[in-house]
Every structure is written in C-alpha cells, then in structure tokens.
Image (tube, rainbow, N blue to C red):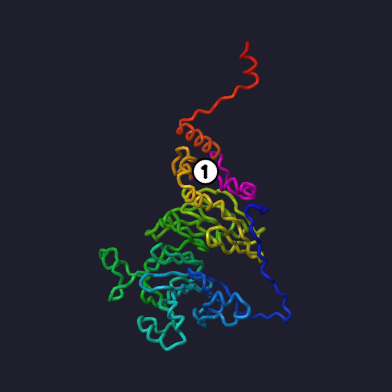
Amino acid sequence: MITPRHAVQICDIPVFKATTPLSTRAGPSCRATIFNPTGDVLFTASNGGSIAALDVNRASHYTTSDDSILWKINQASPYGIHALYHMHPPHIGECIVTGDDEGVVRIWDVRSCANSTSSASKSSAMAFQDCMSLPSGCISSFHENSDLISSFQTDTSCNTLLVSSSDGVLTVIDLRKSGGDGHHAAIQSRPQSMMEPMKLHPDTRQGPFRLFRKSDAQDDELLSMCLMKNGKKVVCGTQQGVLNFWSWGTWGDISDRFPGHPQSIDALLKIDEDTLLSGSSDGVIRILQVQPDRLLGVLGHHEGFPVEKLKVGAGNKIIGSMSHDCYIRMWDASIFYDDDDDDNENGDDDHELNDGRNDEDMHDVRHRDMEAASEPESNEDDWEDVDSDDSMDSESDSSSDSGSGKVKRKFKSENEEFFSDL
C-alpha cells in the first residue's frame, strides 16, 4: 500500500470515450517531451518522426495555446521518435538529441531549428558540409544501432554522449570540437596503436561530432541508464531485471552486474552518487544502493502496472512516476534530500549532533532512515534479506558511543536491587 508519508498527489490522466468507429491506422501521438533548463520551452517528439518546440507560457493558457508552437520540423527522423534529450556542448550551444525506433540518433542545433523557416537557416547549415542531406537544423545523424533508442546521458562537461539501445549496445559519441581535418585533437594525440578507426554505417553523417566507441553486444536489452560514482560508473537497466555496470573509459564489456529485479528495469533516477531509484515492469519503485549493491527499500508502487518514467521536480521536493495505469504519482522526496538541506542550514549545530561520527557513519545513518521509511512495503519483493544489518548497526552505535567518550549508565533490575540490601 502507498503510505501517506510518501504519496503527495495522484494525477489521473483523462480518458475520452471514442465516438467514431475504431481505425486500424494509428494516429499521431506525442511520445517524448523535455523542458529546456529555464523551463519556458517544451520540446516534443511524435510517433510520426516530427519534433516541435512550444512556448510554455502560451501553451498553459487556453486563449493562446493555439499559437504556442515556436517551430516544428516534420519528418525529423525516418521512424517514430522514442527518446528525447537536451544538452549544451561548449562549442555548439543548445542542442536536443532524438532517438527513434530503428536506432537512428540525430543531434539538432536549437538555434538553426528556430530559423528553419527563414533564409538564414541556409547559411548556417553551410557550416557542416556533410549534413546537407539532413533536415534543416540537424547537424549530426548516427545510425549505429539496430533497435529502439531507449535513453541518453552526457558527462558533466558535456564532452561525451552515451546512447543505450534495445539491441544491447552502448554507443559512445565524442562531442568535442574537431580539428581542421575533421579529427579530434584528443584522438590525434594518442599513439598510432591506440587509434582504432570505427567502421561507420552508410547512413551515418557525423557532422561536427565523432563516433568514439561501441560496446560489446550484450545478451539483453538496455532500457534505461544513469551515471553514478561521480561519473565513474555507467548503470543500465535491462530487460531481464539486471543492472549492468560499465567503468568509464572501458567501453567493451561490462564490469559488474546487480541482479534482483523480477522483471525489466524501464526507468532509473539518480538520487546521489551511491543511491538510485528503479522503476520496474512489476510496478514497484525500489531504492537501491550501488557498489556495494544493496536493496534499501521500496518508495511505492503502481499496483502492478509497469513504471515507464521517473523524474525529480525542481527543488528536489517531489519525485514523479508515470505508469501504464494512467496515473502520474507524486512522491515525497524529503527522505532523500532533506538531510542535505538541514546540513546547509544548521552548519555548526550538525557537528555537535554528530558526536564525532565521520562522513561514512552519517552516510550509513541516512540509508537506515530510507530503510525505515520504506519498511512496510519491503516484504513484497523477492530480494534476499541481509541478516548482518542489525549487527552492523549495533556495532556502529557502540563504536560511536565509545568514540564520543560517553559511558552508558547501567540501571539495576528489580532482582539486583532486592539482593543488594542483603
């Protein structure tokens, strides 16, 4: 059951009854959305392969919603678009990335897309000589995967784009500025033996970017992705319910696995460098610690319906989950982020309350708080119980007490008090 502590609000998606005979031909639908960093522009993608940008303020009011489309590009991708991502490469500017059902990844310059209907777009497109056959605003197109593109991620400096696909291959694209001959300076500086040219698909148009590496084909579909451990680990959720780990810079085979989910892992959300949320096809949202791997608890569930998306709201106050049950559920995120806010506000008071405990001890306390908050729902999972938790907690408590120099007072029992007078 969903506890009142975590369930903030449930939004019902309106369902309309069809008044016309059903047609076998699928109509247009919006399959992916993403905001720009300021939140005033919403980018959308459809099953027909088109992308558009909407003015949020105008689209939010019924009197101006019909005039809210800033720009739209039809047939932006040859197939239906499934994934949409926003990034800001230093030498290009604001870009969006699309991934479709057949493995085509395209990178779009937002400024060129906004000017696509004007004559200025023609002059801006001349900067990329090998992109003339692509739609206006598209500066790169990669067709290195053979199945649905599930998710994107970039590093903190936005120099590398990671692409996960249902074909089981993790694709790495170098976003750094290329040299005059079209090759990146970082690649030129490497020894000749380390320069392994990648064989490109005939439909690939790299533009200002370069295909850097492709991982070994896994025996499972890659459905979700996030970066952990300060960018040193890439975590991908798979169809068989296993988390696959890649070490950054080693893009061949995986370095570790974390099994345990009974069904596919369709969504991942990073909480901190050691903690993430997973949304599974069994409808359960789990709280996980990675390396060391551990189930911390359950945030909630969608009553057996698959969880498709997990996102955190502005200010880290609410976590939203979307599922096939036609509900968008809002969860209280205070159990994850309030400790950090209190640390910043209280300052020196926190050091007095720590009683000499180090950062690792406080990190363990934080995870125990997560376990306590989700304890009523943890019995629904098939995960193995860890019997050593209680002993570890008692050892940490005893060590913290001894470290602070305080001795616990021992109270006499009734029998001891009775015989003490004899």
Between residue 14 and residue 301, name the one nearer to us. Answer: 14
Q: What residue is disc 1 on?
A: 365
Q: Position of residue 82 (x, y in %)?
A: 53, 72
Provide residue 134's location: percent of width, then percent of height: 43, 82
Residue 380 located left or right of residue 165: right
> Quadrant location of residue 308?
bottom right
Q: What's the residue at 46%, 49% (across, down)?
A: 291
Q: Residue at x 44, y 41 (%)?
A: 358
The disc labelled 1 sits on which kind of residue? Val
Vertical arrangement, residue 29 with respect to residue 422, above or below: below
- Principal secondary structure, stretch drawn in magenta: helix
Magenta stretch bounds = 363-388
Residue 226 highlighted magenta (yes or no): no
Quadrant of the rendering where the C terminus is positioned:
top right
- The spot of residue 329 in percent (x, y) is 63, 61
Judge the density around disc 1: few (<14), some (14-19), many (≥20) Cα neighbours within 10 Å. Answer: some
Residue 110 visible, this orientation? yes
